Image (cartoon, rainbow, N blue to C red):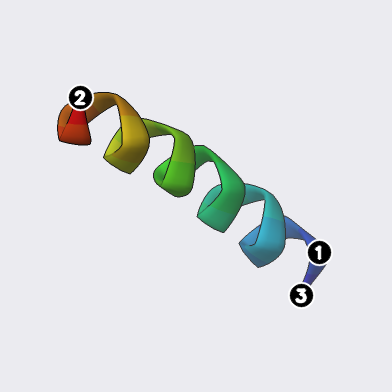
Amino acid sequence: QIRLRKNQLMYDSISELQRK
């Protein structure tokens, strides 16, 4: 589960970058 959480965090970061 922790691994999934880390992946989500990275995904969130990419989403924020794309949002800009």
Quadrant where the image shows the N terminus: bottom right
Residue at the image position 42 percent from the left and 46 percent from the top: 11
- Asked whether the beta carbons under mark 3 and mark 1 sit within 8 Å of each other, the answer is yes
Q: Quadrant of residue 16?
A: top left
Side of 11 relative to 20 (left or right): right
Give the left or right position of residue 12, taking residue 5 as reference.
left
Secondary structure under badge 3?
loop
Q: Which mark is residue 2?
A: 1
Q: First in sequence, mark 2 or 3: give its number.
A: 3
Badge 2 crowding class, 10 Å Cα cut-off, few under 14, some 14 to 19, many 20 or more, is few
Q: Residue at x 52, y 39 (%)?
A: 10
The residue wearing badge 3 is 1
Q: Mark 2 near mark 1, Cβ–Cβ under 8 Å?
A: no
Measure the C-alpha gap from mark 2 to mark 3.
Answer: 29 Å
| Image point (68%, 50%), residue name | 6
Q: Is 18 on the left-hand or right-hand side of 4? A: left
Residue where numbered disc 2 is placed: 20
Say which amino acid is labelled 3.
Gln
Q: Residues within 10 Å of mark 3 (few under 14, many from 20)?
A: few
Amino acid type at circle 1 is Ile
Q: Is residue 4 above or below residue 1?
A: above
Dot 2 or dot 1, earlier in sequence: 1
| Closer to viewer: mark 2 or mark 3 | 2
Q: Nearer the viewer, mark 2 or mark 1?
A: 2
Q: Position of residue 8 (x, y in %)?
A: 53, 57
